[in-house]
Amino acid sequence: MQLEILTREATSGSNHLVFIHGAWHAAWCWEEHFMEYFAEQGYTNHAPSLRGHGGSAGHDTLQAVRISDYVEDVISLTSTLEELPILIGHSMGGFIVQHFLATHRAKAVVLLASVPHTGALALNLRFLKTHPGQFLRSIIRQQSEIFIKEKNCIRDSFFPNLSPPQQAYYFQKMQAESFAAFWDMLLRPLPPVTSSQTPMLCLGATEDQVVCPEEVEQTAAAYNADLVIFPNMGHDMMLDRDWREVANTMLQWLQQQL
């Protein structure tokens, strides 16, 4: 599978970050702020667009793609690196990272507003409550893009703090997502976590209507991970107006772990 992979080389340092985007996004969401920031801090970083996303191949078969296929995309990239990767996963990307850890090693992991290992049932029930019309149409038609076609859903759920022009800019970048992958997150949770030897940081946001802070807290507890909840931020913390606060927190944590 031919993947679009964005890379920013650091002038010094041997650590490699791999950013994994969430549903409806692609590698562009990391390129906006985080990739340049971490390259300047000495971290070479890579952001793949998962199959069927962004500039990657597979758009014509996207609706049949499973979470396991996305995990294979991550494996195909990390297997080319000389060092163990530091994995950064957002939302569905965090769920993918957790699946990766079940069979592969990482130097450290940061989960941003990640779908918990228990799955996305609570997330879907919240969508049903807050946006019932769009949610039910997407289920009936098996088309996840119905949800993101509603600007108010995106504004409320992903980046409520941004100005209308910024919201419109990111709105036009978002795309369809695999419905098979949504069913995987809903019906195929990971087995209970017994232990994790990988240093992990879980990040959440108080205004996140997709993955609520309580779910982030549960994920941190399951993995015995460090936890930070940011006030007054939405789901897309890497695109929020205060994104630098998130990046600084990640950087400080990584410096303590490595």
Image (cartoon, rainbow, N blue to C red):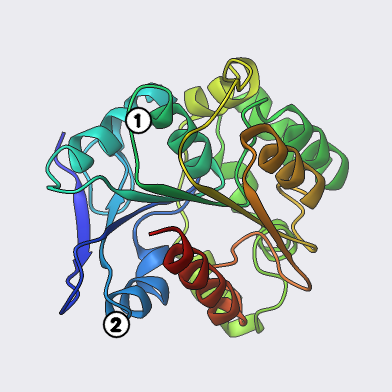
Q: Secondary structure at mark 1?
A: helix
Quadrant that contains the C terminus? bottom left
Q: Residue at x 15, y 47 (%)?
A: 81
Alpha-carbon neighbours of circle 1 within 10 Å: few (<14), some, or many (≥20)?
Answer: some
109 over 183 or under it: above or below: below
Alpha-carbon neighbours of circle 2 within 10 Å: few (<14), some, or many (≥20)?
Answer: some
User: Of 171 and 74, which appears nearest the observer?
Assistant: 74
Q: Can you name the residue that lies furthest to the right here?
A: 129
Give the amino acid type for the residue marked by disc 2 in the picture: Glu
Left or right: 64 in relation to 85: right
Q: Quadrant of residue 185?
A: top right
Instruction: Where is residue 109? Give x, y as percent.
Output: 45, 48
User: Of 57 and 188, which appears nearest the observer?
Assistant: 188
Left or right: 136 in relation to 129: left
Q: Which residue is mark 2?
A: 40
Q: Which residue is mark 1?
A: 71
Instruction: Where is residue 42? Give x, y as percent.
Output: 27, 75
Cα–Cα gap, marks 1 and 2: 28 Å
Left or right: 17 in relation to 56: right
Instruction: Where is residue 239? Give x, y as percent.
Output: 54, 72
Give the amino acid type for the residue marked by disc 1 in the picture: Val
Left or right: 73 in relation to 256: left
Q: Residue at x 72, y 38 (%)?
A: 221
Q: Residue at x 29, y 48 (%)?
A: 85
Q: Secondary structure at mark 2?
A: helix
Q: Residue at x 33, y 34 (%)?
A: 105
Q: Quadrant of residue 102?
A: top left
Residue 66 seen in this snapshot: no
First of labels 1, 2 by sequence position: 2
Residue 184 seen in this snapshot: yes
